[in-house]
Image: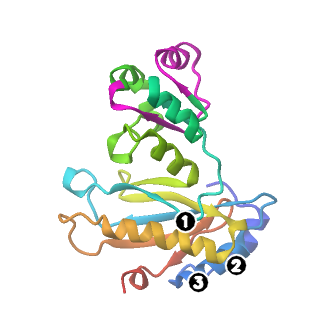
Amino acid sequence: MAKRGKKYQESLKLVDRTHLYDPQEAFDLVEKTAKANFDETVQLSVRLGVDPRHADQQVRGTVVLPHGTGRTRTVLVFAKGEKAKEAENAGADYVGAEELVEKIQNEGWLDFDVVVATPDMMSVVGRLGRILGPKGLMPNPKSGTVTFEVEKAVKEIKAGKVEYRVDKAGIINVPIGKVSFGKDKLIDNFNTIMEAIIKAKPAAAKGRYLRSVVLSSTMGPGIKVNPQQLLD
């Protein structure tokens, strides 16, 4: 295991790794343990009591964080005609059709963070499955990125819409802002995403649903939050 740096070791001394903190205490510690010389991202990791191998225990959705993520996301929209104009007016960074598919296929162009497509374009976008799929960029109706409501989709993404999805290990990892936001805004974002995850509990999930909730900054140690307080 790689040796941790001096700043990390100093931050680690501030955290009791056996203690489950309430959210207010946890975010105080996130601020104190973020010692990098850049504005660190605050990451939320939630381990759920689900078995992702079963389709009826998948946990996935999207939510617009009230204060965004602190990151400007580059949006590519596959659309034609009026829907293309709608995407441009909504603030999409790139808008096109077959010519953008060829650019991605032939040039390996991937200078975007989110891809939105109108349903009638999916037969074209489908050619990019092997390229966009592994990178988590393939448009999907469940995440609201395959839609005729292009304006709404683009504006929500630009405003701070994030997707949460349980991985093979039963964990959701999602950014909830920057340390510079301050505690109040970070707690607003945290409460919004946690409420969505709790509401998304599958009926087939048995036993304790929230197994662990951990907050951390980019370069800081994990800080455990008391899951029971989020359910009360």
Q: Which residue has dot 1 on it?
A: 66
Select label 2 or label 1 by which is in front. 1
Select label 1 or label 3 by which is in front. 1
User: Which residues fall within the magenta stretch?
Assistant: 95-120
Q: Which mark is residue 24?
A: 3
126 relative to 6 in the view: left or right? left
Residue type at the position of mark 1? Pro
Mark 3 → mark 2, Cα distance in angstroms: 19 Å
| Nearest to N terminus: mark 2 or mark 1 | 2
Q: Choose between 4 and 48: the one closer to the eye.
A: 48
Q: Is residue 54 above or below residue 6?
A: above
| Nearest to N terminus: mark 3 or mark 2 | 2
- The answer, for residue 226, to whether it is visible in the render is yes
Q: Is residue 36 above or below residue 99?
A: below
| Nearest to N terminus: mark 1 or mark 3 | 3
Residue type at the position of mark 3? Gln
Q: Which residue has dot 2 on it?
A: 13
